[in-house]
Amino acid sequence: MAFQFVGAMGVMWIIAWFAMVRRGDLPVAAPSVAVAETASPLSARRSLFDVIFSRRMLALLIVVACINTCWQTLRAWLPMFLQKGRGYSEAEALYFNSLFFVATDVGCLGAGVLTLWLHRRGWSVHGSRSLVFVVCAALTALTTAITVLPKGWLLLAVLLVVGAGALGVFPIYHAFTQELSAEHQGKVTGIASVAAWAFAPPAQKLFGRLIDRTGSFDAGLALAGWLPLLGFAALWLLWDKQGPAAGKAPERHGSQ
């Protein structure tokens, strides 16, 4: 009943929002510097159809499907992995789970800080985002190491690093969506969210079957950790070069 109540309140808020907001409340602002550097010259005027069926949109659909499936797998199975896979007590697993979520918050905030730091040192907006994304994805792939780590502080430390990377890719993904269209941002995010949840639930079933077949959580967690890198591969292969090169940022002349 609690979930239905929250959902009903959300529907009521949507109705109230549409009733109160007028077209004049949503003026179209001039593109920001970030948009100007990363989007194509016509991105602000492209139709929704062109945006949805673009190479960039396809890349982002794959990215969000990969990173969300990875995150939901790690989040859901971590307590059971610690208890049944490594012999921790329920209390120990729950305490560590709280620490794990602190690490994910650090990764989420740290990804944004690092992206800004790189951009201020000459990297383009897209280049700094891409580098931080692949770094976080590489940290998430450290799930491979847990297959050989026994119970102990090293295992827990690796899991914290994995958690930071697993959630660190999300703000970067949302930043990438801003490079598609200045006009259709909300639609792009909403459509991509469908892909985010199209694969995560079936993956949970496959993960459970793998546990039943192997009697271990290790293989499933190791595979899940590589999904963000798979998403980055799609980003690297499919992202067109409409904007400036993704290396160093273009120089700005004149007074600041």
Image (tube, rainbow, N blue to C red):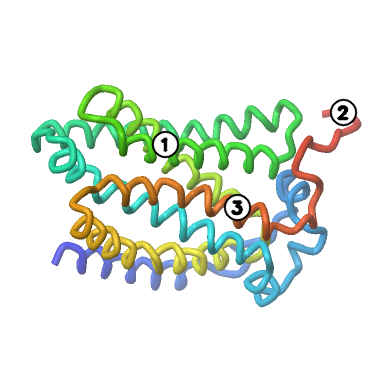
Q: Position of residue 40 (x, y in %)?
A: 79, 58
Q: Indicate the amino acid at tag 3.
A: Ala
**Residue at 59% across / 48% down in the picture?**
175
**Which circle, 2 or 1, is nearer the viewer?**
1
**Residue at 37% across / 40% down in the picture?**
143
C-alpha distance separating marks 2 and 3: 39 Å
Question: Dot 2, how many residues are within 10 Å of its Cα: few (below 14), some (14-19), or many (20+)?
Answer: few
**Which circle, 2 or 3, is nearer the viewer?**
3
Rendered view: 20 above or below 70: below
Indicate the secondary structure of the residue bearing disc 3: helix
Q: Indicate the amino acid at tag 2.
A: Ser
Q: Quadrant of the N terminus?
A: bottom left
Asked whether, in this view, residue 79 is left or right of residue 175, the answer is left
> Of label 3 and label 1, which has the lower sequence position?
1
Q: Position of residue 120 (x, y in %)?
A: 70, 28
Check disc 3 and report the residue beneath it: 233
Check disc 1 and report the residue beneath it: 142
Q: Which mark is residue 17?
A: none
**Residue at 66% across / 77% down in the picture?**
49
Label total for image: 3
Check disc 2 and report the residue beneath it: 255
Could you say which quadrant of the image residue 210 lies in? bottom left
